[in-house]
Amino acid sequence: MLQLKTTIKLPVLPARVWAVLTDFSTYPEWNPFITLASGDWKAGNTVAITAGGMSFQPRVLKFSPGKELRWKGKLFFNGLFDGEHYFLFIDNGDGTTTLEHGERFSGLLVPAFRKKLETETKAGFIAMNEALRDRILQLNASSLAG
């Protein structure tokens, strides 16, 4: 098993982070890592995602507004190469949110992809976190100006 974890502090409350992160139709405009996310986002449902150049159809495990978003995908069948992707929203109590963004990989092929996951995939998570922060700042600035 391999666990990747990234965090970023965002200058807004969890509800605002949630609103931007779950506005999936805008991902092509700002998200460098997950370029497509569509479907009926409810726990138990299957959705469509393109991330890191790969397309797959994970099952939504949790969709708790302002708290947690989690899905699990697999390559071909369970146990070969599985990934449980998650976003946890932590209210810092000062008008900011710490977003924990990561994935737990398991399966027979994880050792073969470990180096790529620890470098390229983790870099993709960080790039997405930073783009999310920039998107939030841009939207805040345009709402203040408007």
Image (spheres, helix red, strand yellow):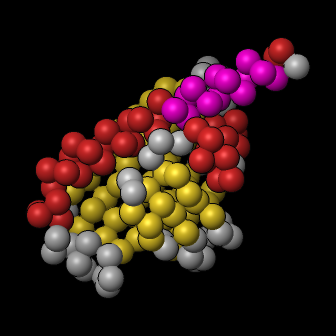
Q: Quadrant of residue 93?
A: top right
Q: Is residue 108 visible?
A: yes
Magenta-span inclusion, residue 87:
no
Locate residue 103, reporting x and y percent: 35, 55
Q: Is residue 69 above or below residue 59?
A: above
Locate residue 31, reporting x and y percent: 53, 42
Q: Is residue 92 visible?
A: no
Q: From which residue to which does the magenta span run?
A: 131-143
Locate residue 10, reporting x and y percent: 55, 26
The residue at the far bottom in this view is 77
Q: Say which residue appears at 37% left-offset and 48% top-offset.
A: 102
Magenta-span inclusion, residue 141:
yes
Please give left or right for residue 94 compared with residue 53 in the image: right
Q: Is residue 138 above or below residue 64?
A: above
Q: Quadrant of residue 83?
A: bottom left
Please give left or right for residue 6 compared with residue 108 in the image: right
Q: Say which residue appears at 52% left-offset and 32% top-offset.
A: 131
Q: Say which residue appears at 58% left-offset and 38% top-offset.
A: 30
Q: In the depicted view, which residue is nearer to us: 23 or 101?
A: 23
